[in-house]
Image (tube, grey):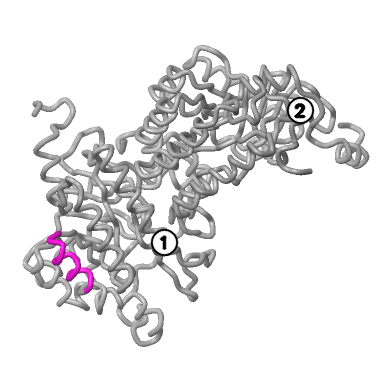
Amino acid sequence: MAERRPLRRLGVVRPRRSLRLDGDDLGALARPALFSLGAYGPERGVANLLSLLRGHGITATFFVPGWIAEQWSDCVTDVVDGGHELGHHGYLHELYFDLSLEEQEEIIAKSQGIFQKLAGIEAVGYRSPSGDFSEGTPGLLDRLGFSYSSSMRGGDLPYRWTVDGRVTDLIEIPSKWELDDFPQFGYHDDPVTPSGQDRLSPLRATFDNWRREFDGHYRFGLCYVLMLHPQLIGKPAKVKLLGELLDHIRAHDVWFATGREIADWYRSTVAPPGGGGR
Amino acid sequence: MTPGEAAEIRWPDRAKAAVVITVEFDAELFWLRLDPSVNERPSTRSIGEAGALRGAPRLLGALGAAKVPSTWFVCSDLVERYREVVEAVAADGHCIASRGPGLVDFAASTPSEQREALESSRERLQGVVGTAPTGFRPPGDITEQTIGLLLETGHRWSSITRGDDRPLFLSGADGRGRDAIVDIPRSWDLDDASRFLFNYGPPYPRGQGRIAPYRAVLEDWIAEFEAVVEFGRCFVLTLEPQSIGSAGRVGLLEELLDHITARTDIWITTGEGMDEWWRSTAAGAEWPPEGIRRRERRRLPSTI
């Protein structure tokens, strides 16, 4: 899928987004209502979520922006000590689509340095923050030795990335917006989120969507990749409903895996096309 | 008028109502139409690509299991890229119709551009399917010249308007195409992409509305179907493989098709089947309605 080239190249001009942000710009003091909205994640949500996962005996993959790791280093330690995987998610949740490859590489190096310092590890998995990365990103990730990306929003099975016509060992583990809590539950009045100020999605209806998606993935033997944000899913009612969803999933014959495990399994099991076979 | 008494429409074999399942096969062109930057956005493109390669086969599976014929409007820009998908649709006996090239906005094109797009799409679809399509549903709207151009380029029917719940004859203000192009009206109520598709950049829906609750949408569609049958009209469902074909949503379609096929008193047909029937039996309804036609004619410059 990923190796298919775009049909047409149309001209496009887009503004470069400034990268100059630091803690003050993020508004910890100046915009406490806005800042604390996200801070619920590391302050409370992560602990609630880790406790739920522990109860179910499930390990997860946490994609953590470097800046968040610096501010809430205890969270990083808790995640790693809990046996969960730490993945790359930008330094300030930058939209990679807007960045040159040099800028992307800088952000990755900086964030890896932070993970190294805090937990003595570097991320092998990458999830692009805020949507699209650029056409050159898979080549960069491959060159930097990443094991996998989980950034595509179409597809339901892992596959290898093709870079400049060469099938690589970089695995893609795609997910979808319909398995993301943010489109359903992200909300704020200023800045307005979502842009049309749609109302919050009903909880049970959303979990029913996710349950139906799981049932479909199970039926067709696919890879179900749920994307959750501790600032949303980590709240009491949602964490409880997530528990019900996990109960439902665990009643089936499935393999709970981290991104790293999926990528390792896929690389060792599925040979690249034209390769030496299994 | 009371429901159920509207038996003024005669369907084949004394059926109470008609059903036409339509599919818009747009894949990544759905996203490219929103913003050309999608050419450089692999993640956004992958939503449409997965729709073609993963969603379409699952959709075909659901239709095949229910033995329900459907009508696929295929963008001709996609026929080489997804040749195997289009061939599978044709091999399963579904009706294939034209959606134009895929990125052409007919409402914003000159008559000669439209003609070129209609002709080339027809040829490219014929090249893969073997027969030239007779039906047409573009993305977006058309102009009044389109109807005459459809006739001149070998089309017989379309599915464009949204103002009725039974087929009608379509004609431009100039009267061309009158009594010649059968249009099968569709409805936003029975459209899946507007309920389920989502993306942040480029944003869809534009106001970033939530993904609809699956169960509620299924309940809506069943309610619509029951009411359309009671009124004796035509149920026209519009599906997009990347939307209905997700692993978790194809089951909704299966439940709906179970519901539909459980009735033996309805007629399930394709765009072509409806075109033939309506042409052979029906009279009356037209777009634009006579009143609007008269008013429009007074307003239009005499050159038209």
Highlighted magenta segment, given as a residue range: A48-58
The image position of residue B134, as x and y in percent, is 62, 19
- The answer for how far apart the CA atoms under marks 2 and 1 are is 42 Å
Looking at this view, is B177 or B36 the one in front?
B177
Q: At label 2, which amino acid type do we have?
A: Phe
Mark 2 = which residue?
B169
Q: Please identify the quadrant where the C terminus of chain B is shown.
A: top right
Which class describes the residues within 10 Å of circle 2: few (<14), some (14-19), or many (20+)? many
Element assignment for label 1:
helix
Mark 1 = which residue?
A184
Residue A234 is left or right of residue B175, and the answer is left
Q: Is residue B131 visible?
A: yes
Vertical position of residue A237 compared to residue B185: above or below: below
To which quarter of the image does residue B85 belong?
A: top left
The image position of residue B117, as x and y in percent, is 61, 26
A248 inside magenta stretch:
no
Q: Are marks 2 and 1 on the same chain?
A: no
Looking at this view, is B196 or B98 the one in front?
B196
The image position of residue B287, as x and y in percent, is 78, 34
Residue B66 is left or right of residue A119, and the answer is right
Chain under disc 2: B
Element assignment for label 2:
strand
Q: At label 1, which amino acid type do we have?
A: Gln
| Residue at position x 13%, y 50% in the image | A145
Q: What kind of secondary structure does the magenta stretch mostly adopt? A: helix
Chain under disc 1: A
Looking at this view, is B288 or B268 the one in front?
B268
| Residue at position x 75%, y 36% in the image | B6
Residue reaching furthest to the bottom:
A29
A56 inside magenta stretch:
yes
Q: Is residue B145 visible?
A: no
Vertical position of residue A101 compared to residue B80: above or below: below
